[in-house]
Amino acid sequence: MTDTDALSDRGSEGRGRKDRGRGNVFERLALFIRQVVFELRKVIWPTRNELVNYTIVVLVFVLVMAGIIAALDYIFARAVLFVFG
């Protein structure tokens, strides 16, 4: 059986129909690894420049969100101290 034959037998949930329950553990593991490699060949990997840009965007977003949460925490802490303190 080739890689594409095993992939074409998938159901809508992605599980193989013919191969379910067939073969020993090592054959099923080998099939799984072949399918993973086949899928990874389809991936369009980002260039180094894109990766750096995406990383910067994520870091800036995380820092902004951390600042917003810290500000809200400070405001709510002051409000609780004002009301109950």
Image (cartoon, rainbow, N blue to C red):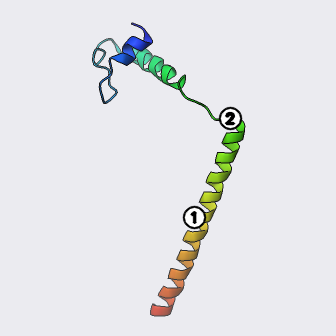
Q: Is residue 71 visible?
A: yes
Whole-angstrom CA distance, mark 2 to mark 1, is 27 Å
The N terminus - image quarter: top left
Which residue of the protein is positioned furthest toward the right in this rendering? 49
Horizontal side, residue 10 vs residue 40: left or right? left
The local crowd at label 2, few if under 14, some if 14 to 19, many if 20 or more residues have their Cα within 10 Å, is few
> Percent x, y for residue 9?
32, 17
Question: Callout 2: helix, strand or loop?
Answer: loop
Q: Position of residue 47 (x, y in %)?
A: 68, 35
Q: Nearer the viewer, residue 43 or 36?
A: 43
Q: Residue at x 42, y 8 (%)?
A: 2
Q: Disc 2 vs disc 1: which is toward the camera? A: 2
| Residue 79 screen position, x and y as percent | 50, 87
- Residue 63: x %, y % from top left: 63, 62
Relative to 2, is 45 above or below? below
Residue 57 - label: none
Give the secondary structure at mark 1: helix
Dot 2 corresponds to which residue? 47
Q: Residue at x 61, y 32 (%)?
A: 45
Any part of residue 85 in sight:
no
Q: How many marks?
A: 2
Amino acid type indicated by mark 2: Thr
Q: Is residue 75 above or below residue 68?
A: below
The residue drawn where x is 58% and y is 30% is 44
Residue pointed to by mark 1? 65
Q: Amino acid at mark 1?
A: Met
Outermost residue, top side: 1
